[in-house]
Each structure stands twice: as C-alpha cells, then as structure tokens.
Amino acid sequence: MNPRPRLTRSIPFWLLVVGSLASVGVGSYVLTTNIGTMVTTLTDGTATGVEVYAGQVWGVLGAILIGVGLIGLALALTLGALRAFAPAPTVEVIEAAAWDEPVEATSPVAPVAEAPAETVVAPAPAADTEVAETPVTR
C-alpha cells in the first residue's frame, strides 16, 4: 500500500488545473471580444477613444489571463512529471501490536462482594380469602 495519495486524488492539484483552464477561458473571451470590437469600429470609422484606448487595456488583461493560465497548466504538467520520479517513502513493518501480547496483572484485584438478598413482603390479598404472608426473596 502506498502511503502517499495519488496525484489524481489531490484536491490542490485539481484546483490548479481547473483554475488554469478557467483563466485561459476567461482571458480568451475578454481578448477576443474587445479586440473584435476594436477591429470592427476602426474599420467602420466609428471608433471612439473609449473603444480604442480602453479596448487595448482589456486586450492586455485578457492576454495576461491567458498567460497565467498557461503557466498554471505547465506547472501542473511539471508537478505530475516530478511526482512520477519521486521515490516512495519506506514503510517500517511492526512485528506485533502491543495489545496482542498477554498481560499479567501486577496487583491482585479484590473480588466484588455480592449484595445480600432482599426480603420483600407481598401485599395482603383481599379480606375474603385466607392466604398466609410469605416472604419473597429476590
């Protein structure tokens, strides 16, 4: 049994992969929509300063998000490759567990005294029948 969990079962690894893919997706969306808007307005001749200058900033932001996502994916790939080459730690086998060995009492335990029997008198029956009272022991 391998004491280390597999990389495919590691939550931080999958957060890195999913976060990187999300960053690439959002960056691609931001980049294509803003560059597309800039290109259409510049070719039509209807471009304003907001579309041109703000569009450039949004395009740079999209490119940064794509770059960060690609770096994250490369890091995940590198982590997977390094994990394959890392040696597994040695596991020490224990011969017998402590609870498997016989236990000798070091001090005698005094026996528990039994409780004395309790005598209970049954209630008297109705007056028309004659029954002698007998003690009942439990």
Image (cartoon, rainbow, N blue to C red):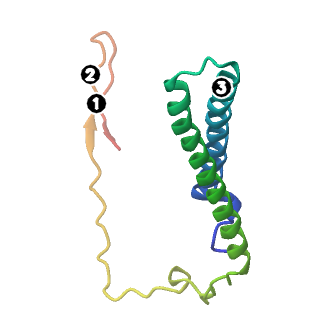
Residue 13 seen by the camera = yes
Q: Position of residue 137 (x, y in %)?
A: 33, 44
Residue nearer the viewer, 84 or 42: 42
| 42 shown above or below 30 | above
Position of 53 compared to 32: left or right?
left
* Label located before the other in sequence (2 or 1): 2
For the point 29% across and 76% down, which residue is it?
Answer: 110
State which tag comes first along the sequence, 3 or 1: 3
Question: Quick check: 12 above or below 78?
Answer: above
Say which of marks 3 and 1 sits in front: 3
The residue where tag 3 is placed is 42
In the rendered image, which residue does mark 2 sit on?
A: 124
Disc 2 vs disc 1: Cβ atoms closer than 8 Å? yes
Position of residue 95 in the picture relative to residue 81 (left or right) = left
In this view, the residue in front, 71 or 112, is 71
Q: Could you give the CA–CA distance between mark 2 and mark 1, rounded to whole angstroms?
A: 7 Å
Residue under the image location 50 percent in, 84 percent down = 98
Amino acid under label 1? Glu
Amino acid residing under circle 2: Ala
Q: In this image, 125 relative to 44: left or right?
A: left
Please determine whether, in this image, residue 126 is positioned above or below residue 109: above
Are circles 3 and 2 on residues that touch, CB within 8 Å? no
Of residues 83 and 26, the one nearer the viewer is 26
Mark 3 residue element: helix
Q: Is residue 107 shown above or below 19?
A: below
Q: Which is more N-terminal, label 2 or label 3?
A: 3
The location of residue 17, given as percent across then percent down, is: 65, 53
Disc 1 element: loop
Residue 77 x, y percent position in the rendering: 71, 64
